[in-house]
Amino acid sequence: MSRVRLEVCCGSADDVIQAHKAGADRVELNSDLFHGGLTPTLGELIVAKRETGMPIMTMVRPREGGFCYTQAEFDTAIEDAKLLLHHGADGLVFGFLHPDGTIDLERTRVLADLALEAGKECVFHRAIDVVPDWREALDGLIALGITRVLTSGQEPDVSLGTDTVREMITYAAGRIQILPGAGITARNMDRIIAEIGCSQIHLAAHKQVADASVSNNRSIYYGGCLYPPEDRFQMIDSEYIGGMVRRLPE
């Protein structure tokens, strides 16, 4: 039996490099993790792939705030997906819902087919956690050939949803991979793996990194009304994740 596989949620090419140093098996590359992850730039993908060579799943999400998109947003997602695959993405991560929260199977089929025809993986992300009936949702995704589903068990934190994730794995019966994620830390990882009986996990662990270039005028902000500090940013903590990798059960 192989070791439990670790996927790291990344928000930049540097994040991917740090995740690779930590020994991660795979990454999910995004931009704007503050909003749950949006489509990364091609430059991030190209640099990350060149520097690490590791499997990189790329988010395809044209905006924050829900998963029911306008036609222009969906068209953008299609074009982004094509470009990401062309530039080395090992798979696409996406999720499309109707206004009532059920899965938009037609739009899901379009991106799934793009990935599968390119010989790549396709992942339905945590939009699964807001559907009214996860069993019906899984049936639809299985019929489309989706590789795996990222889920917290329809809870804010997967540590609260282990029973549901375990039920999902049993229900899937090998027809689709179930990837637990959201809120996994060094403190709860062992318990979550034991309770779910999973073969892979998804997590993020960032640290603050200082950037002194803006220190001359601390009254200036470039973001929105939250006014985040401009003299620091987030980066994957490779030492923290590396310690988790070394503890993953065989």
Image (cartoon, rainbow, N blue to C red):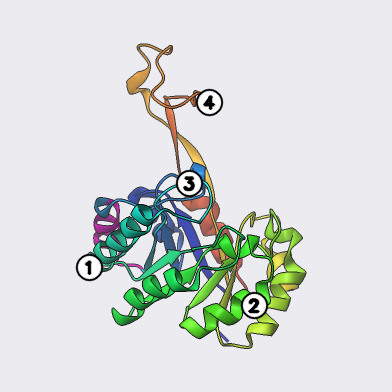
**Comparing marks 3 and 2, which lies closer to the viewer?**
2
Taking 98 as reference, is 76 left or right? left
| Numbered disc total | 4
Indicate whether residue 126 is drawn in magenta: no
Can residue 221 be seen?
A: yes
**Comparing marks 2 and 4, which lies closer to the viewer?**
2
- Residue 67: x %, y % from top left: 51, 56
The first of marks 3 and 2 along the sequence is 3
- Secondary structure found at label 3: loop
Start and end of the magenta stretch?
Answer: 44-54
Is 110 located above or below residue 47 in the figure? below
The first of marks 1 and 3 along the sequence is 3
Front in this rendered view, residue 113 or 203: 113
| Residue type at numbered disc 1 | His
| Residue type at numbered disc 2 | Glu
Q: Marks 1/3: CA distance?
A: 24 Å
- Residue 101: x %, y % from top left: 61, 61
Question: Contact, CB < 8 Å: mark 1 with mark 3?
Answer: no
- Tag 1 residue: 86
Q: Which of the 4 image quadrants contains residue 20?
A: bottom left
- Tag 4 residue: 226
Q: Which mark, by number, is residue 136?
A: 2
Front in this rendered view, residue 157 or 111: 111
Is 61 located above or below residue 146 in the figure? above
Q: Marks 1/4: CA distance?
A: 37 Å
- Tag 3 residue: 64
Q: Marks 3/4: CA distance?
A: 16 Å
